[in-house]
Image (spheres, rainbow, N blue to C red):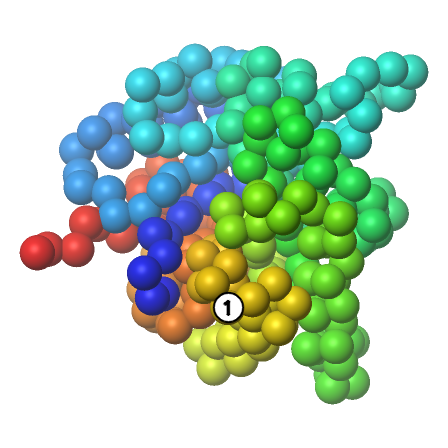
Amino acid sequence: MADRHPLIAGNWKMNLTVDEAVDLAAKIRAGIAERTVGADVVVGPTDLCVEAVSRELKGTIVGVAGQNMHKERSGAYTGEVSGEMLRAAGANWVILGHSERRQYFGETDAGVAAKAVSALAAGLKPILCVGETLEERESGRTLEVVLGQVDGVLAGLPENELAGLTLAYEPVWAIGTGLTASNEQAQEVHGAIRNRLATNLGSAIAEKIRILYGGSVKPDNVAGLLALQDVDGALVGGASLDAESFLSLIPPLPST
Ligand code: PGA
């Protein structure tokens, strides 16, 4: 993990009513207060719950992320929410380009890049997701696909924002399936992403960008993943919906 401070982010997806989301946030708040925390921590409720969850977590170290946003600030885009609206509701992060967005809602690298520019302008920190399908992995195209997505989602981002970015490598075949990339598979891709960033942006920036791993991260596999050289945290779906399991993913402060 080098010198990068880890980030543990929960993606609640399309789960939990407002009351349920506030209840989970309250449990996380209580759990965080009882332990030393050696990571940045973020939760990603639905848009509908961002405001109430942000209020519940106010004054804690836990940040709040939207799961998606529109690239425009406002306008005639029925059913959509802008970065500015998320920010005003209390979010300070936004997950962009999740594979479910790519798979079911036609999101493209260029679209994700445009949203990322707009997110940064709205004061949100984007978590930019990339990852290959099983078919792409089995046909030996993992690195080609993932590195292509990395190039695509970073295109056009302001240079002064690059070092503060967060990427998430989530193999599509590992999301919600109980299958996790082996430590070797994860490090291979994370290392290749870091090399690509170094080539494109210079090694000083590449060393600062956090690359999270996502895909069936659980209490029993998180430590092995976080110990890898180029894994800087986790983006967690299923295991983030239970306070105990989410809290147990958060590394303690290293003892000095
Ligand atoms: P999962 O989801 O942890 O349930 O596999 C991860 C994600 O989609 O971000």
Q: How many marks?
A: 1
How far across and how far down the image is residue 193, in percent? 59, 70
* Residue 148 at least partly seen: yes
Residue 36: quadrant of the picture: top left
Q: At numbered mark 1, what does the secondary structure look like: helix, strand or loop? A: helix
Q: Is residue 252 above or below residue 125?
A: below
Residue drawn at 34 percent across, 66 percent down? 2
Identity of the residue furthest to the left in this view:
256
The residue that label 1 is drawn on is 203
How far across and how far down the image is residue 5, in percent? 34, 52
Q: Specify whether tag 1 is near ligand 1 (CB below 8 Å).
A: no
Identity of the residue furthest to the right in this view:
76
How far across and how far down the image is residue 228, in percent? 38, 72
Residue drawn at 44 percent across, 37 percent down? 42
User: Is the N terminus in the top left, top right, bottom left or bottom right quadrant?
Assistant: bottom left
How far across and how far down the image is residue 125, in percent? 55, 37
User: Is the C terminus in the top left, top right, bottom left or bottom right quadrant?
Assistant: bottom left
* Residue 221 at least partly seen: no
- Is residue 194 found left or right of 249 in the rendered image? right
Specify few, some or many for label 1: CA neighbours under 10 Å numbering under 14, 14-19, or 20 or more.
some
Q: Is residue 57 above or below residue 177?
A: above
User: Could you tell me the amino acid type at mark 1?
Assistant: Ser
Identity of the residue furthest to the bottom in this view:
140
- Is residue 207 found left or right of 127 in the rendered image? left
Residue drawn at 52 percent across, 63 percent down? 206
Q: Is residue 214 above or below residue 90?
A: below
Residue drawn at 57 percent across, 56 percent down? 168
- Is residue 112 found left or right of 4 in the rendered image? right
